[in-house]
Image: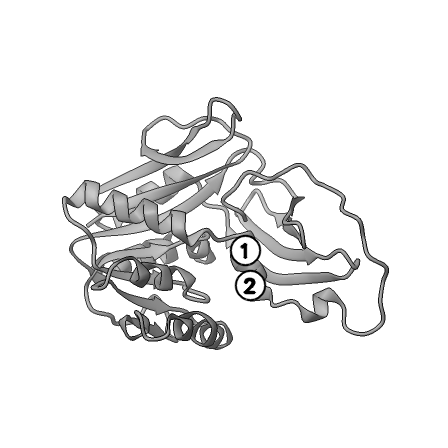
Amino acid sequence: MSNKKPKTRTTYRRIPKAKGPTQADKADRHILYERAVQCVESEIDMVDETYKTLRGRKAITLREDFCGTANTSCEWVRRRKDNQAWGVDLDTEVLAWGKNNRVNALNGDGADRIVLMNENVLTVKTPPVDMILAMNFSYWTFQTREELRGYFSRARDCLADNGILFLDSYGGYEACREMEEETDHDDFIYVWDQAHYNPITGEMNCHIHFKFPDRSKLKRAFSYNWRLWTLPEIRELLAEAGFKRVLVHWEGTDTKSGEGNGVFTPTENGEADAAYICYISAEK
C-alpha cells in the first residue's frame, strides 16, 4: 500500500501489443515495489528526527525487520558515516536481490556497515540497537494477540536501553473493504488489491498487481495474509510487552490540497478518514 494518497486513475495511450516478451515479462517486481510503495528517504527522516527528539541524541544503530530488499537499511547507512544497520528477513530470494542490487551498489561506502540476516525476527540475535523498524505493515503477519505480543516483547529485548521500536499502521473505514485501488506511475499502474476480509477474525488477503502500457499485467507480484490490527489493539499489546511509552504520530493536512503534508506529529486525536497511514513509536 502506498504511503501517498491515491491519485485519480488516469488512462494513458496504450501501445500496440507486440510479439515477444511483454513489459510485464521484462519488469523487475522489486524495483516496481520500491517505486510504488516505499519512500525510504521520508521514512528515515521521520524515525531519525523522532528518535533525536525523544532521546536527545542521534541514533547510530538500526535493525530493519522484514527488510525485503534492505532499501531502508541502505538509506540509513548513507545518512552518516558511523551509522550501522542489520536487515532481517526469511526470504532468501529477496535478500539476495537486495545484496546484489542495493547493498553492493553502495560501492563500499556503507556496504560494510550493513549485515543481512536470513533469519526469523522472533529468534534472531543481533547486538542491542537504537532503533528497530517493522514497516509496510509487515508485522501484521502475526495474527493472534499472543503472537504479536511475543514479537513486540522480543523486539524490546533486542533494543538498547534507550531504544525505540518504530511501526507503521493503516486504517480507516476503507481498510476493511474488499476493493482495488489504482495509482498511475506514468510507465506502469500500481494496483493495491484488498481481495478478502473476514470481519469475525480480522484476517485479510491482499495482493499487489502491476499493469503496463502494452496491456500486459504482473498479477500477484506480492501477496499478503495479514490480520487487520487496529491502533488500540497495537498500543495495548505494546504496553503489555513492556514498552514504557507508545505514541501515535499522525500526519498533518496541507491546507491547499487537503491531502497529507508529510509531517507526522504525536497526538491522541486522529481524524476519521476513509484511509490513513500513521507511525507508531514504542520506547523501551
Image coordinates for residue 221, horizontal then vertical, percent: 63, 63
Q: Is residue 237 visible?
A: no
Q: Amino acid at mark 1?
A: Arg
Tell me the residue that label 1 is attached to: 35
Image quadrant assignment for residue 128: bottom left
Image coordinates for residue 66, horizontal then vertical, percent: 41, 63
**Residue under the point 72% across and 65% down:** 23
- SS at mark 2 in the image: helix
Q: Which mark is residue 283?
A: none
Image quadrant assignment for residue 267: top left
**Residue under the point 27% across and 60% down:** 62
- Image marks 2 and 1: residues in contact by CB distance under 8 Å: yes
- SS at mark 1 in the image: helix
Q: Which residue occupies the extreme top position in the image?
A: 255
**Residue under the point 62% across and 40% down:** 177
Q: Nearer the viewer, residue 47 or 192?
A: 47
Q: Is residue 128 left or right of residue 203?
A: left
Q: Which mark is residue 31?
A: 2
Image coordinates for residue 172, horizontal then vertical, percent: 52, 34
Disc 1 residue crowd, few under 14, some 14–19, many 20+, Cα 10 Å? few
Q: Amino acid at mark 2?
A: Ile
Name the colouring of the figure. one colour
